[in-house]
Amino acid sequence: MAPPEQRTVVPMPHSSVVPKQPGCSIKILAEAPSEGARALGTIHLIGHVPAEAEVIRQLEQKACEIGADAIFVRKIEQQSAAGQIDFEVTASAYALESGGASSVPGGKSAGEP
């Protein structure tokens, strides 16, 4: 697996969230939360991987590194060529408030159908 060519995380000012362990559980939101969550910043990844699932795995990995509980994918573009997937993805990262998962629309843990 090749690492992304570019990784950018733009944190929000005064973010005091502690990084999480690699492989932490990240919720993928169907829409941006209006309540029950605090914005941590924007994750922007560009690169190429051998499988589509690897794009989301790398996004989740970066979200864990900045201490996020959830992400909302704002933009994802990908093309397959020569057995590789070229991608560009932009997501907003959020820390969920205590009990906030129930008030955040469309929240799914990674790997949920």
Image (cartoon, grey):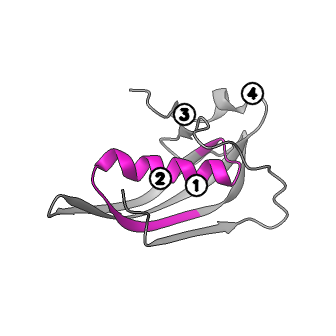
Q: Where does label 1 land, which residue?
A: 62
Q: Residues within 10 Å of mark 1 (few under 14, many from 20)?
A: many
Nearer to me, 19 or 93: 19
Q: Position of residue 56 (x, y in %)?
A: 43, 48
Mark found first going from the N terminus, 1 or 4: 1
Q: Which residues are magenta?
A: 43-70
| Of the pair 110 and 81, the residue shown nearer to us | 81
Q: Amino acid at mark 4?
A: Gly
Total numbered labels placed on residues in the image: 4
Q: Check disc 1 and report its element: helix, strand or loop.
A: helix
Instruction: From the viewer's perspective, tell me whether residue 55 is left or right of residue 85.
Output: right
Q: Classify 111 as above or below 48.
A: above
Q: In what quadrant of the picture does the N terminus appear?
A: bottom left
Decide which of tag 3 and tag 4 comes sooner along the chain: 4
Which kind of residue does numbered mark 1 sit on?
Answer: Lys
Amino acid type of the residue tagged 3 in the rendering? Gly
Reading the image, the residue beneath label 2 is 58
Q: Which residue is mark 4?
A: 99
Tag nearer the camera, 1 or 4? 1
Q: Are marks 1 and 2 in contact (CB under 8 Å)?
A: yes
Residue 55 among magenta residues: yes
Label 2 residue SS? helix
Local packing at callout 3 (Cα closer than 10 Å; few below 14, some 14-19, many 20+) is many
How far is disc 1 from disc 4 in space, using C-alphas?
23 Å
Residue at x 53%, y 31% (from the top left corner): 109
**Separation of residues labelled 2 and 4 (CA atoms):** 26 Å
Disc 4 crowd rating (10 Å Cα; few below 14, some 14-19, many 20+) is few
Instruction: Give above or below for 104 relative to 78.
Output: above
